Image (cartoon, rainbow, N blue to C red):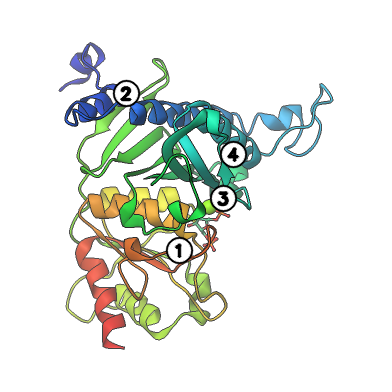
């Protein structure tokens, strides 16, 4: 479609409309998920707006300091957490929340309780805020077993039990990528409408890519398999061309590129941190869910990432995710060891 026609489209597929369409395929659905998602979307819009003004905050006082009105300014990650916690509880559809920012899980009081559990990192990559690099929110959704009696065991479940997962990237545009277990779809925020519009339907990750993405500064502590894999990316022995290295250091941005362009993203365990850095519940699981739904794979060095059963809510795991064939190669190296 040319730009003029695009500008006059009148049948925009907003994220709410999209989820309602999905819901109509399940006659038993009562619209709870749509309501929950609308509250997540509200949180994303709020954080998107706050992130885009982050530089301007200097005019009024640095984060953590007082602004000209004498009010203390909240750091963006703290603010984002508050926004999501409040939005999720007020949806009336959640019963347990696990946030990277909160040490303990939040159990929603009975009068506001619903059937969903949301695990999330409200502002991942927040060390990148001050230089304007893309950051994001990551979330995964489970369903509670017994709404009257939610327990931590409802959360400490494999990622394959999630009913939905997604992320919102605050970058040159604000993009929400979502899967409800039926493929992956990407929505871009149209600032003039204040709505997320379906712009990337049915995202499929290429089977093989020519990019690898890893923090090579940790190479001296890597295990043999990771070192061998990355060595092959640079000096392939099968006649293929060397892969390019792209590493932003912001998981949402690195995974987003991997989904769209293909290739592999690695955050391996190493001698210093045997479990790597990334958190199972709200980083590894949602991203693995999306990558699998897009036709790729996600592996921990031992097993399929979505099969991990976390023992603690803030547990970490090594992760290798991306194009099917590229992840197959690292699996082969670990199996051979
Ligand atoms: P954070 O949750 O403290 O922001 O850390 C998570 C981030 C990820 O976005 C990114 O993939 C990783 O840390 C980068 O880590 P490193 O700086 O060690 O390469
Ligand atoms: Mg994080």
Q: Is residue 265 left or right of residue 294?
A: right
Gap between marks 4 and 2 measured at Cα:
23 Å
From the top left corner, tell me how far across and down residue 233 is, in percent.
Answer: 31, 73
Gap between marks 1 and 4 measured at Cα:
22 Å
Which residue is tagged 1? Answer: 310
* Mark 2 Cβ and ligand 2 under 8 Å apart: no
Q: Is residue 161 above or below residue 129?
A: below
Q: Is residue 142 above or below residue 210?
A: above
From the top left corner, tell me how far across and down residue 30 is, in percent.
Answer: 29, 26
Pointers 3 and 2 in contact (C-beta within 8 Å)? no
* Mark 3 Cβ and ligand 2 under 8 Å apart: yes
For marks 1 and 4, the one nearer the N-term is 4
Gap between marks 4 and 3 measured at Cα:
9 Å
Pointers 4 and 3 in contact (C-beta within 8 Å)? yes
Q: Is residue 69 left or right of residue 214?
A: right
Placement of the C terminus among the 4 image quadrants: bottom left
Q: Nearer the viewer, mark 3 or mark 1?
A: 1
Q: Which mark is residue 81?
A: 4
Which residue is tagged 3? Answer: 100
Pointers 3 and 1 in contact (C-beta within 8 Å)? no
Please report the residue visible at 48 percent of the width from the left and 44 percent of the height from the top: 149
For marks 4 and 3, the one nearer the N-term is 4
Q: Nearer the viewer, mark 1 or mark 2?
A: 1
Rate crowding at label 3 as few (under 14), some (14 to 19) or many (20 or more) other CA atoms within 10 Å: many
Rate crowding at label 2 as few (under 14), some (14 to 19) or many (20 or more) other CA atoms within 10 Å: some
Which residue is tagged 2? Answer: 16
């Amino acid at each position: 479609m040319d730009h003029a026609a695009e500008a006059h489209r009148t049948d925009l597929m907003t994220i709410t409309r999209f989820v309602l369409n999905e819901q109509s395929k399940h006659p038993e659905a009562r619209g709870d998920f749509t309501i929950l998602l609308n509250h997540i979307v509200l949180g994303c819009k709020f954080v998107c707006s706050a992130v885009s003004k982050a530089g301007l905050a200097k005019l009024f006082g640095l984060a953590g300091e007082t602004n000209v009105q004498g009010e203390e300014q909240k750091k963006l990650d703290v603010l984002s957490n508050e926004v999501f916690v409040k939005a999720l509880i007020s949806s009336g559809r959640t019963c347990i929340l696990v946030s990277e920012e909160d040490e303990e899980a939040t159990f929603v009081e009975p009068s506001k309780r619903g059937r969903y559990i949301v695990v999330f990192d409200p502002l991942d990559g927040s060390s990148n805020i001050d230089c304007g690099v893309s950051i994001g929110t990551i979330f995964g959704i489970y369903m509670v077993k017994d709404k009257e009696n939610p327990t931590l065991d409802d959360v400490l479940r494999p990622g394959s039990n999630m009913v939905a997962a997604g992320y919102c990237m605050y970058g040159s545009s604000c993009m929400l990528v979502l899967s409800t277990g039926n493929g992956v779809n990407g929505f871009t925020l149209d600032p003039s409408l204040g709505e997320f519009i379906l712009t990337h339907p049915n995202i499929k990750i290429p089977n093989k890519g020519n990019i690898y993405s890893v923090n090579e500064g940790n190479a001296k502590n890597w295990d043999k398999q990771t070192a061998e894999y990355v060595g092959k990316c640079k000096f392939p022995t099968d006649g293929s061309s060397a892969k390019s290295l792209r590493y932003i250091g912001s998981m949402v941005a690195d995974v987003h590129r991997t989904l769209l362009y293909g290739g592999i993203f690695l955050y391996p365990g190493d001698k210093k941190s045997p479990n790597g850095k990334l958190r199972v519940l709200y980083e590894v699981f949602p991203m693995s869910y999306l990558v699998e739904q897009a036709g790729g794979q996600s592996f921990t060095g031992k097993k399929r990432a979505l099969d991990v059963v976390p023992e603690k809510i803030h547990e970490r795991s090594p992760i290798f995710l991306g194009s099917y064939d590229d992840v197959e190669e690292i699996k082969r190296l670990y199996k051979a060891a």
